[in-house]
């Protein structure tokens, strides 16, 4: 798919994504359907479909696509953060606002609206607006008209009533009713939305203060109860400190335990560290295949360091023939996501 094509078409109905064209790089494959992707204040699971690719991944937004039958027909799954500049106390108030916002945001030069619904809803006890939007994209002069359909949910974040999370799935190029396969996968995608705290609990804030003051042991003592209670960011800090012996005696086995707890929310730094642990044999027998599995999960979320390492693994290929094509593909993706080192590998090896 063209570098900006998915984002361009999504931007027609979701103008908040229009600016992501500057961030979009090569389409990156998503190899782990259903895996958690964390963002600032929430987590969603990647769609449970094969042959997915990501076009955008930031701390507040992602766009994942799937080509169906032909390039002109595409499914997309989108999540993004909205800041409307005001707070919302009820689902009805939010629905009325989003109806106006979405309709005034349509690109009327090329879109003809066919239907639009906004219904008050609730998700995890939060006020939301469940919506459906269907329009015809007339395209540029000489283009054939194409149907575009969106279904989604916009919710108020628990910690900030003026911060919204929008999660949706769409079809471009279908005829008539939206695909049943897409509807089923899209419904699971939306229901996977889980809110995370935007404001660190006092115990975590105090732990960070102790860490900055050089008291890592005191910080860990505060973080461990939080990790045991399910705070995955606390588990990540504890696991990394124990793995490498940062301010506390090294205990790689316990470090791995806490990192695997943190990995349940899909934090990229944790996924990468687990890959490095198996690559180097820290606290576990060295296992290159396990390292690759963890790095692929990080690469799904466009992590350039994981993609760089996967390229190196493909090139060096322990106990297997060198896979030049795979190595070059990984380095190209990593370079597209900002890795200068990957670009050097790509050029030096004449990819």
Image (cartoon, rainbow, N blue to C red):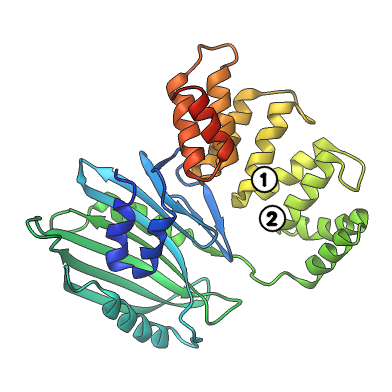
Q: Where residue 72 is drawn, which disc sits there? A: none
Please identify the quarter of the rendering in which residue 38 is found: bottom right
> Which residue is pictured at 64% across the width and 68% down the height?
197
Please identify the quarter of the rendering in which residue 1 is found: top left
- Residue 336 showing in the rendered view: yes
> Which residue is pictured at 54% across the width and 20% down the height?
315
Name the one closer to the observer, 303 or 268. 303
- Residue 48 showing in the rendered view: no
Sequence order check, earlier mark of 1 and 2? 2
Q: Where residue 270 is drawn, which disc sits there? A: 1
**Residue 260, image x, y percentages:** 69, 43
Classify residue 68 as left or right of residue 17: left
Classify residue 253 as left or right of residue 187: right
> Which residue is pictured at 23% across the width and 53% down the height?
179
> Which residue is pictured at 75% across the width and 57% down the height?
234
Q: Quick check: marks 1 and 2 in contact, CB under 8 Å?
A: yes
Q: CA distance from mark 1 to mark 2?
A: 10 Å
**Residue 202, image x, y percentages:** 79, 72
Q: Where residue 232 is drawn, which disc sits there? A: 2
Element at badge 1?
helix
């Amino acid at each position: 798919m063209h570098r900006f094509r998915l984002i361009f078409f999504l931007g027609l109905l979701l103008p908040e994504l229009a600016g992501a064209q500057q961030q979009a790089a090569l389409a990156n494959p998503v190899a782990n359907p259903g895996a958690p992707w964390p963002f600032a204040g929430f987590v969603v699971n990647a769609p449970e479909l094969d042959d997915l690719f990501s076009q955008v991944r930031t701390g507040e937004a992602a766009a994942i696509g799937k080509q169906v039958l032909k390039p002109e027909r595409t499914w997309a799954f989108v999540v993004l953060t909205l800041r409307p500049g005001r707070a919302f106390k009820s689902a009805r108030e939010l629905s009325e606002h989003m109806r106006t916002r979405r309709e005034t945001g349509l690109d009327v030069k090329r879109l003809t609206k066919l239907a639009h619904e906004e219904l008050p809803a609730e998700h995890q006890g939060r006020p939301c607006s469940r919506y459906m939007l269907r329009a015809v994209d007339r395209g540029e002069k000489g283009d054939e008209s194409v149907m575009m359909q969106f279904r989604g949910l916009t919710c108020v974040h628990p910690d900030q009533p003026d911060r919204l999370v929008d999660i949706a799935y769409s079809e471009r190029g279908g005829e008539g009713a939206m695909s049943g396969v897409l509807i089923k996968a899209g419904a699971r995608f939306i229901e996977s939305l889980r809110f995370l705290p935007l404001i660190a609990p006092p115990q975590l804030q105090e732990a960070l203060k102790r860490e900055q003051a050089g008291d890592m042991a005191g910080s860990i003592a505060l973080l461990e109860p939080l990790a045991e209670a399910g705070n995955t960011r606390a588990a990540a800090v504890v696991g990394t400190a124990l793995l490498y012996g940062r301010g506390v005696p090294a205990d790689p086995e316990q470090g791995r335990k806490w990192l695997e707890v943190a990995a349940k929310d899909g934090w990229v730094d944790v996924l990468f560290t687990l890959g490095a642990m198996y690559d180097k044999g820290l606290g576990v027998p060295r296992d290159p295949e396990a390292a690759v599995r963890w790095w692929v999960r990080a690469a799904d979320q466009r992590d350039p360091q994981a993609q760089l390492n996967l390229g190196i693994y493909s090139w060096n290929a322990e106990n297997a023939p060198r896979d030049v094509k795979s190595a070059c593909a990984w380095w190209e993706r990593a370079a597209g996501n900002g890795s200068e080192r990957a670009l050097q590998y790509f050029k030096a090896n004449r990819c």
